[in-house]
Image (spheres, rainbow, N blue to C red):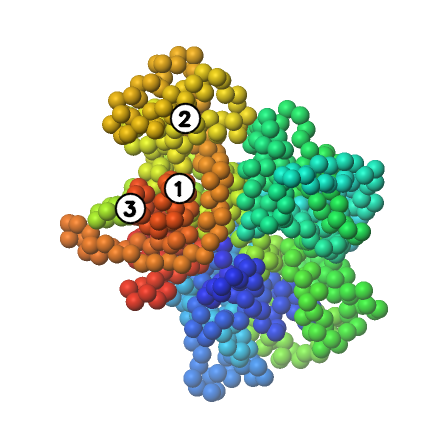
Amino acid sequence: MIISPPFLPDARANESDETFVSRAMTSALTGKFPVSFEMQWHGGIHLQAPDSDSPVRAIADGNIVYLRQPTARPTNPTELEEHPLYDPNKGWTDNGCIVIKHQTEIGENITVTYYSIYMHLNHIENDLTQGNNIYRKTKLGSAGQIYGQDNLIHFEIITADDQIENIIGPITLNRNGANYYTNRQGHITHYINRHGRTSSCFGNMYFYLPADTPTYNGVHNTNHYTHTATGDTLGQALYLEMKYHSGSCTFTAYDENGTQIGQPVTTNGDSPRGSVHEYNLFDQSSKICSAMPTAGYELLRFGRILGTETAQDTPTHYRQIPTASGNTWVNLNTEAIKKYSDADFPFWKDWSVADDDTNNDSRCDSEIVRTILDNGTAGSFARLTDAQKQTRLTEASIQQKLQKIFYKFPTEWQNANFEERFGWIKNPTNQGGRNQTDEQFTWFQNHVQAMTFWEQANIGIDANHWHCPPIEFIKHFRKCGWLSDSELKQLVPSHAIRGNNWEPVHEYNRARKDLRLNINKMLRKYCINTPLRMACFFGNAIQESRWFVGLQEDSADSRWYYPWHGRGLLQLTQPYNYKYYWQFRGREISQEFETLIARHHEVEIMDYRQRKANRNRFQDIQFPSLDQYFIWRDEVANQTNIDPTDSAGFYWIKNSMAKYADETHTLERVTINAVRNQGTKVYYRSSAFWHASAKVNLPSVINTLYSSALNGFDQRCSVYGNCLAVLTEMKFPDATNNLTLEFPEGYKRREM
C-alpha cells in the first residue's frame, strides 16, 4: 500500500513523516472525527488547505466511482438566500464531490478495498470523469467553502464490513470478545493470549511481557555483552515497542493504558560495541544464531522468525529495556512473550473498534465514545452545554483516543429515511436536540439532501459501514510498504538513458508477478521500508535484472569469472560472495569449495588477459563433487525461488546500503542530447543514490562522485527518479533548477 495525505505541502528539512502528515492534514475548528459537538456521527474530518492554491489530491491509486461537479453559487442575492446550500447565518457550502475506490495489499494474500471521499470541492479538474483510473497525488480539484469558511474539505475513508478484519486484523477486531472500552480486561486477555499476525507485519514491533518475565544483568566486555540471571522478575506486565529508525533502535515501555513507563532506551552507532541497532543487524545476526544467521537476523528484526528457515535450538534474544525502576535486560525469545507489529493495531497505542451503536439514526449513542468523552469527570457528557462539548471534543487527550478508533455507523450522505436519521434533532430532551419548527427542519432536510449522494453513487457497500480514522489511517499505513502488482509495475520506468541513447523499457509482467511476493517479503525482512531506501534498492535492482526479466548477468559466458557471474536482483558475483550468502542461510561450506575460491582468487589477482586465459581453473568440470553448490547457485537465478530476492536483501545489509540511502537526497538534473534526433533527455541523480549504488556495485569509487567506472549509473538513475515519483512526494528540478516537476521530465507513467 502506498498512501499520502489529500494535501501535499512541501516537506521541511529533518521533518518526521508523522509530523508531515499532521501538517498536511490540519483539521478545522469544527467538523471533527467521529462526532460533532451536537453528538451527531461525523464520518470524516474537515481539513484546512495549507494555502489557498493547494490542490486536493488523490490519496492512493484507484478508480473514480462517483463524481459530482460543484453547484454554482448564485450571483443573485435573492436566489442565493433561497438556495439550500446557503445558510443565512453561516454562509455558502460547496457540494463538489469525488469518491475513489482503492484496492491494494497490505501483506501476503491480504487484499484490502477502501474508499476515500472528498466533499465540498468548489472546482474539479476538467480531465477527471467517473470511471477513470487515477494515480496517487493526482490533482482532483480545489477546496471550497463549508458554511462560509474558505479552503476546507470534508475528507473521509470508509470500508465495508467484509474488509475491516483484513485491514486491522482479527485480534484487534475481536468480534467474539469484549471491546476494550466496554470491558477492558476481557479484551486484553483475548489480545495477549496469542501472537500477532505474520501475513501482515509492518512498522514497529511490539511485545507483551508478563509480570513474571525474568530479568538479567548485562555486562559489557570489549565487543559483546554477557548476561546472567538476577533471580528477579519484572513484577509488572509491560507492553514494549521496538522501533528501528535512521540506524537506531529504540525500546519504549507502556502499561495497558498506554502510559509510558520509564525512559526509552536507544542504541545506535555511538553505543558500546555489541549493542544492537539498525545498521549492524547483519553483524549481530551470526552472534545470536551462528548456525543460521538468517534466523538470527529475523529474531533481531521482528522479535520472531517469519521465514521458513529456523534455528535448530532456541537462541536467546537479550535486549535492554526500560521499567518503572530503571533499565534491565530480558530475553525476548520466549513463548510467554507475545509478539506483534503495527499491523495488529495494538490497544496500548489507543487502537480499537466501536460498533456498539446499533440503531439507524445519526446520533452517536456509543457507550465507547461517551466513556472517552466523560474523561473521568463527574456527571455525564449529556449534561454539558454545547460550548463545553465543543471544548471537550477538541481536547488533545480526547482527540488522541477518538481518532484511533474504527467506527461503524450509517453514512451521513444517504438521502433515504431522513426522518428516522435526523428526527431526534427536533426533540430538545435528546442529547444534542434542539427546538426546531417544521419550517426549520424542512430547510435542514433540503440543505442536507443538496449534498447527499449515496444512492446515486451506488458504490456497492452498505450505507451502515466502517469509518476509518482519516489522519491516523494514513499515518499508519505509510509504514506498510507492501507493494501491489500495480504499484510494483509503476516502479519500472517507461524509458531509460544509456549513454546518449533514450531507450524504451518493456514490461515483463510474468517475471515481475513471479517475483513480487518474495520481493515484498525481502523488503520487509531487510528493513528496506522507507520510500528513499526502496528507491535506492529498486534503482539498482530493476536495472540489474533488466527490468525484472533477466536474473543473470548479460553475456555471462564472456566474463572471466564465469560461471560465478552475477545472479539475483542485486547480483551476487564471485564464488566468495555466494559463499557468504550460503553461510548466512545456514549452509555448510566444504573444503573443496574453499579450494575453488582459492583458485578463483589466484586468477582474480592476475591482469585482465591472464584472467580470461586461466578461468578454466575454477570451472564446474574441475569440481565434479560440488553439484549441490551448483544447484544452489542456479537457484539465485530462479524467479520462482526466494533466492533471487533474499540474496539481494542479504547483499543490501551486508554492504550497509541503508546507511547511504538514509542520507539527504538532493536531486540534480542531468541532460543528454539523445541520438536519432530525439532531442534533450533528462535523468536525476543524487549523492545519496550514488553512494548506495557504488557501495553495492563498485566500492572503490564510492568517494569519486559520479565516476564513469560504475556501470549503467545513468540507467539506474532513470529507475531511481521514476521510483521517487511513485513512492515519495518529492518534486524534481526543472530546466531552471526549481523544484516544480511532479514526475520525471519526458517519462510516462505505467498504466494501472
Q: Which residue is mark 1?
A: 699
| Residue 369, placed above or below residue 656 | below
Disc 1 residue type (three-letter)? Pro
The quarter of the picture where residue 205 lies is: top right
Query: Which mark lies nearer to you, 2 or 1?
Result: 1
Q: Earlier in the sequence, mark 2 or mark 1?
A: 2
Whether the residues at callouts 1 and 3 have beta carbons within 8 Å, the answer is no
* Disc 2: CA contacts within 10 A as few (<14), some (14-19) or many (>=20): many
> Which of the two residues, 71 or 508, is positioned nearer the viewer here?
508
Q: CA distance from mark 2 to mark 1?
A: 18 Å
> Which of the two residues, 220 or 359, is positioned nearer the viewer here?
220
Q: Position of residue 383 (x, y in %)?
A: 79, 72
Whether the residues at callouts 2 and 1 have beta carbons within 8 Å, the answer is no
Q: Earlier in the sequence, mark 3 or mark 2?
A: 2
Q: Which residue is mark 3?
A: 708
What residue is shown at x 63% (from left), y 76% (from top)?
Answer: 441
Whether the residues at callouts 3 and 2 have beta carbons within 8 Å, the answer is no
What residue is shown at x 68% (from left), y 51% (from top)?
Answer: 265
> Which of the two residues, 1 or 448, is positioned nearer the viewer here?
1
* Disc 1: CA contacts within 10 A as few (<14), some (14-19) or many (>=20): some
Q: Secondary structure at mark 3?
A: loop
> Which of the two residues, 384 or 234, is positioned nearer the viewer here?
234
Q: Which residue is mark 2?
A: 575
Q: Which mark is on residue 96?
A: none
Q: Position of residue 176 (x, y in %)?
A: 73, 43
Tell whether 608 sits left or right of 724: left
Q: Secondary structure at mark 2?
A: helix
Residue at the far bottom in the pictured view: 77
Disc 2 residue type (three-letter)? Pro
Q: CA distance from mark 3 to mark 2?
A: 26 Å
